[in-house]
Image (tube, rainbow, N blue to C red):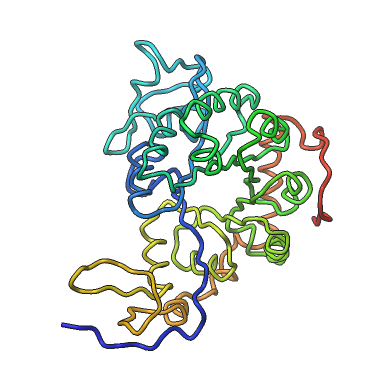
Amino acid sequence: MSLPLATKPSAAPRQFPDCWGHRGASSRFPENTLASFEAAIRDGAEGIESDVHVSADNVVVMFHDPALERTTDSTGQIKERDWHGEKGMKHVRTIKEPKQAIPTFVETIELLMKPENQHANFNVDVKVQNDPDRLFALMHETISAQPDWETLLAPRILLGLWHPRFLSYAKTRLPYCRRSYIGDSPYIARKYFWADCDAFSMAFGALTTADGQRFRVECKAAGKKLMVWTVNKPDHMMEAVRWEVNVIITDVTKTWLDLRTALQGTFFTLESAKMTWAYADVPFIADYEKIGSQYGRIFLWTTPKFYTPYLLAHSKQAQSYLERIAGPFDAIAVTPAIKTQA
């Protein structure tokens, strides 16, 4: 049996966003676990995203919340709990099945240093509860202990920073790591992070507004990488493709990878059942125009949380939260590289 021949896509092959697993393949496995990270990489993701905190006995762990309650069978603030010992966090397990241990930064780096995983990027979301000097010193100890770390590991690590206070420590302690701003405000990105970051990891809603559109143009003109999170709906993924972002960060890695495959116009041979990226006189399953047209844009006008007043209020609330923990943004001396817009 053979498939009928189809015409080549009407548009030239596009560069599609990379897929980075948000806390791994977290829709299918417990978030921020080795099982979740491995699943994302096996799915074909080009990177994983995870969060860091430090235990009372100086172990860097991969965990989103400052406290254990939401996702594990234990309680307490991570910074107040030991990793080692009879009551240490190394014995804690996830609530979600299949139950998993909390991975350490060391274990995660070891996973990424396996030969089959040395293509995967690692986006480290640096939670604002951390002491940046302490955290980055501990991270450097682990990174620099790996064989050929300067070529095989360091170029793959992207530090995600929420607060400008962390920039100077990142540049001093981990100068070999790329840096990104994480947040939901183009204004904050321009004012505090523009000159010192290689990439900008933006909440999806922040890029839906007129100012978000301007910011997308500015990033492209300046050669800054643009990442968007957390994108789980196919119509939102398609919109991110139209925006020409560099990375889609998602809980549903397989959903985006399958959609990307369809958009790229892949073909396969029935005999080998092996997927091949190419444009040739072969049976195309789909093309960009046909697939893309199935996903409309009406949600941009019918979703209240994508309206500017909501986004501005949410951004102000987020900034207040960050400043309560790590101090005022304006206490940090920074020079914006481009004019800021409120």
Name the residue nearer the viewer: 257 or 28.
257
Q: Look at the image and tell me in which quarter the N terminus lies.
A: bottom left
Q: Position of residue 211 (x, y in %)?
A: 73, 63
Residue at the outermost top position: 86
**Number of marks in picture:** 0
Q: Residue at x 39, y 44 (%)?
A: 117
Direction from residue 295 to residue 185 in the image, left or right? right
Q: Residue at x 35, y 85 (%)?
A: 281
Q: Is residue 188 above or below residue 11?
A: above
Q: Look at the image and tell me in which quarter the C terminus lies.
A: bottom right
Direction from residue 283 to residue 182 in the image, left or right? right
Q: Position of residue 57 (x, y in %)?
A: 50, 14
Name the residue nearer the viewer: 247 or 223.
223
Name the residue nearer the viewer: 63 or 173.
173
Direction from residue 20 to residue 35 in the image, left or right? left
Q: Quadrant of residue 290?
A: bottom left
Q: Position of residue 92 (x, y in %)?
A: 35, 24
Q: Residue at x 50, y 33 (%)?
A: 65
Q: Is residue 226 above or below residue 134?
A: below
Q: Position of residue 73 (x, y in %)?
A: 35, 27
Residue at the outermost left position: 1
Q: Residue at x 45, y 15 (%)?
A: 82
Q: Quadrant of residue 125?
A: top right
